[in-house]
Image: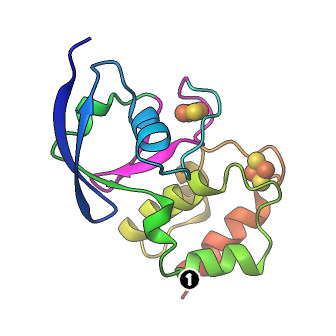
Amino acid sequence: MKKVPIEFKLNGVKRRFEAAPNDTLLEMLRDRLGIKSPKTGCDRGDCGTCTVLLDGRTVRACLVLAPEADGCEIETLENISKKPSPLQKEFSKRNSFQCGFCAPGVVLSATELLRKHKKPTRPEIQEAIAGNLCRCTGYSPIIEAIEAASKK
Ligand code: FES
Ligand code: FES
């Protein structure tokens, strides 16, 4: 299959990539560019472990084709973790995660929410992370951490 050259910003750095038309954004990031925070869970848009920010909005990287990222800005947990935010500190303080598999996706969904809504309500928080499945925690420590971070 003929590859297409694409350009984008990845965590603030300009990158070029030769993408096959059927490469997903997740495959490009994890398998070709060494960005390991987005995880392969269901690979069909159900679990949210592959969440990244594309032009500031959360997307499921398993459902986006790499060529669709041409000209876009991609942000992953690697960027956000360079300087831990109050949000990440609250997650850590409260041991919000157990196995941690869902954590990168949850952090990105919560980051998008708090960038857009400084003081989200509990239903807004629940809605923001509704696409991120967590098998371990029952969500309470995650929601409480997001609420606490929004007050800082
Ligand atoms: S791996 Fe993408 S939503 Fe599950
Ligand atoms: S902490 Fe294990 S899936 Fe969320």
Considering depth in this image, is 107 or 4 the residue closer to the camera?
Answer: 4
Residue 54 is left or right of residue 86, and the answer is left
Residue 57, compared with residue 131, is above or below; it is below
Q: Position of residue 46 (x, y in %)?
A: 60, 29
Residue 14 sits above or below residue 141 on the image: above
Residue 61 seen from this side? no
Q: Residue at x 52, y 80 (%)?
A: 85
Q: Quadrant of ligand 1?
A: top right
Mark 1 surroundings: few (<14), some (14-19) or many (≥20) residues within 10 A: some
Please identify the residue farthest to the bottom as the structure is shown: 152
Amino acid at the residue labelled 1? Pro
Residue 132: percent from left, percent from top: 62, 44
Range covered by the magenta-colored residues: 44-62
Q: Nearer the viewer, residue 23 or 115?
A: 23
Q: Quadrant of residue 90?
A: bottom right
Quadrant position of the N terminus in the picture: top left
Looking at the image, residue 130 sits to the left or right of residue 28; the answer is right
- Location of residue 87 (image quadrant): bottom right
Residue in view at x 56 percent, y 53 percent: 37
Q: Is residue 109 magenta?
A: no
Would you say residue 61 sits in the magenta stretch? yes
Count of marks placed on residues: 1
Report which residue position mark 1 lands on.
86
Q: Quadrant of the C terminus?
A: bottom right
